């Protein structure tokens, strides 16, 4: 939730116990930044400067690369931003780039220029991290307004280059995807029709297809709340609901949006600009937003959408607040919810997946003195155990390899790029061969990460081997290290099948930890 800009032109030291931070977003149509005062406790931050520099990065999806002029303009914008940050004695900085930089093949050149000239590390984030940031911003906004959204919420940011989509259930981000539907992108695609009466009709037809594509890619289930944000959506909301309060979340009736769109279709560009109180381009940018909004609403049979007054920068600020774990972080419970959704998407057995994850974490917890790993590695193991079998959706043969590239290909919020590769490798090695020199995905990981993957994959193999029948016959176990062996005590007497299974799967544990694995049956009473 943002506040009104305080209009300060000279820096000052932050009050005792607080600090100033800067967050920046390099988007398709502008570079924007907040300089904010962060308290020592709580989340009542204050925006000191709201900086915006209109810069078009549309060449990234027109030609696939950024021009030298565009790069120069971005560097100039960050030069001004960093000068303001210096005035406020900013110590913490996070700058991100979104869809335009993801698509530009030469975005690395811009990133290196900013690092070399200004010591700014511009991070090109993936869609999953973008969705996480928007959902965090929404969470803060609802929390401050003492509001809750029950059921499943579809959170959408309609950007200039792409649409970022997140599905929230019980407060957890369980699914994220993107769609190449952006207001600026569409203007470029249909530039030849800009002065034609076909312009608005063509956009409307295109938006209908995009809305259906977005919804088809979501997990099955009812959408209870449709939340859409972006500068264009907020502008549309202010046109149709002049009484809307900035800094809140406002309902917008779909019938009003549809009526407005129908009026706009028959107008010329200049007439449309006059009706919207802006220039022709600004008015044209409202059409893709309004059309997507009304088609999404129609598809899910919703008579209204909720328009939150938030930006990506609010999500970036949320990561800076006291108690925050920082970027790319979702709790173990959130990751588990996201993993469960992946299992459901690929037709997996939830009971089997969750029991495997439970067994794996039991082994992890009870062998802590052997591996010395912490909570984050435990969360990676739990997630890997949940999704290790999703490759069966493609083919049971080589399903471990299919699981690997499915994990690499889907959006997973709450994991860094390296962590996502680690999870993919852990799932890949839950069966069949161990890591070998020619396995390029494994060998490309940093050495320390390869060690973690080997430890966690060895543990996952044991959990996997204990449920051969996939009936969750074994739910609890007790691990004991004794005389060079790992004894796994289970509450079953008949365990011949499990012993046979572990004979084929415990080799990696022995290689990594130097312990023979023995399954111990319950004693006869």
Image: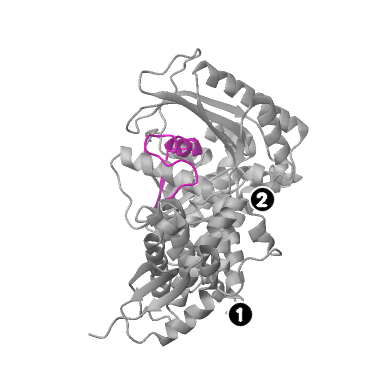
Q: Residue 398: x, y in percent?
A: 61, 76
In this picture, is 228 found above or below 245? below
Q: Earlier in the sequence, mark 1 or mark 2?
A: 2
* Closest to the observer, 118 or 475: 475
Q: Is residue 399 magenta?
A: no
Q: Nearer the viewer, mark 1 or mark 2?
A: 1
Secondary structure under the numbered disc 2 in the rendered image? helix
Q: Residue at x 58, y 44 (%)?
A: 125
Q: Secondary structure at mark 1?
A: loop
Q: Is residue 359 above or below residue 134?
A: below
Gap in Å between the C-alphas at discs 1 and 2? 51 Å
Horizontal relation, residue 93 to residue 369: left or right: right
Q: Which residue is mark 2?
A: 198
The reply to whether callout 1 and callout 2 are in contact (CB within 8 Å) is no
Q: Which residues are magenta?
A: 304-330
Question: Is disc 2 surrounded by few (<14), some (14 to 19) or many (20+) residues within 10 Å?
Answer: some
Quadrant for the N terminus in the image: top left
- The answer to whether residue 73 is left or right of residue 319 is right
Q: Residue at x 59, y 34 (%)?
A: 273
In the image, residue 200 lies at what x, y percent? Answer: 61, 48
């Amino acid at each position: 939730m943002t506040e009104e800009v305080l209009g300060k032109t000279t820096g000052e030291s932050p009050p005792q116990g607080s600090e100033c931070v800067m967050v920046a977003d390099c988007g398709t149509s502008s570079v924007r930044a907040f300089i904010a005062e962060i308290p020592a406790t709580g989340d009542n931050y204050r925006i000191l400067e709201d900086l915006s520099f209109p810069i078009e990065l549309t060449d990234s999806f027109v030609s696939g690369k950024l021009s030298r002029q565009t790069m120069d303009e971005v560097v100039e914008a960050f030069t001004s931003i960093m000068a303001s940050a210096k005035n406020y004695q900013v110590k913490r900085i996070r700058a991100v780039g979104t869809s335009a930089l993801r698509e530009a093949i030469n975005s690395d050149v811009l990133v290196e220029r900013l690092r070399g000239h200004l010591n700014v590390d511009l991070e090109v984030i993936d869609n999953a991290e973008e969705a996480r940031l928007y959902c965090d911003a929404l969470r803060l906004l609802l929390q401050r307004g003492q509001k809750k959204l029950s059921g499943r919420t579809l959170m959408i940011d309609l950007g200039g280059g792409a649409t970022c989509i997140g599905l929230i259930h019980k407060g957890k981000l369980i699914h994220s995807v993107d769609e190449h539907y952006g207001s600026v992108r569409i203007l470029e695609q249909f530039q030849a029709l800009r002065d034609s009466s076909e312009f608005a009709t063509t956009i409307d037809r295109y938006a209908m297809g995009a809305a259906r594509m977005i919804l088809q890619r979501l997990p099955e289930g009812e959408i209870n709340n449709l939340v859409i944000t972006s500068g264009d959506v907020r502008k549309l909301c202010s046109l149709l609901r002049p009484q809307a309060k900035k800094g809140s979340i406002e309902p917008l009736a779909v019938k009003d949006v549809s009526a407005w769109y129908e009026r706009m279709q028959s107008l010329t560009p200049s007439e449309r600009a006059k009706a919207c109180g802006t220039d022709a381009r600004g008015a044209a940018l409202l059409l893709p937003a309004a059309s997507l909004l009304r088609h999404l609403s129609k598809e899910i049979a919703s008579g209204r959408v909720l328009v939150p007054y938030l930006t990506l920068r609010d999500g970036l600020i949320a990561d800076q607040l006291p108690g925050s774990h920082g970027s790319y972080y979702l709790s173990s419970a959130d990751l588990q919810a996201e993993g469960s959704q992946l299992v459901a998407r690929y037709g997996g057995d939830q009971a089997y997946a969750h029991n495997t994850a439970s067994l794996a974490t039991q082994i992890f917890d009870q062998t802590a003195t052997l591996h010395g790993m912490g909570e984050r590695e435990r969360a990676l193991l739990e997630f890997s155990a949940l999704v290790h079998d999703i490759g069966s959706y493609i083919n049971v043969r080589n399903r471990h390899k299919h699981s690997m590239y499915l994990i690499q290909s889907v959006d997973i919020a709450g994991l860094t790029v390296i962590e996502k590769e680690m999870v993919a490798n852990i799932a890949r090695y839950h069966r069949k061969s161990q890591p070998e020199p020619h396995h390029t995905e494994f060998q490309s990981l940093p050495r320390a990460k390869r060690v973690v993957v080997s430890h966690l994959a060895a543990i996952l193999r044991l959990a996997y081997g204990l449920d051969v029948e996939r009936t969750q016959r074994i739910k609890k176990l007790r691990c004991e290290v004794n005389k060079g062996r790992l004894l796994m005590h289970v509450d079953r007497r008949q365990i011949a099948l499990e012993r046979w299974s572990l004979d084929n799967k415990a080799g990696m544990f022995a290689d990594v930890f130097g312990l023979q694995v023995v399954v111990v049956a319950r004693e006869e009473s």
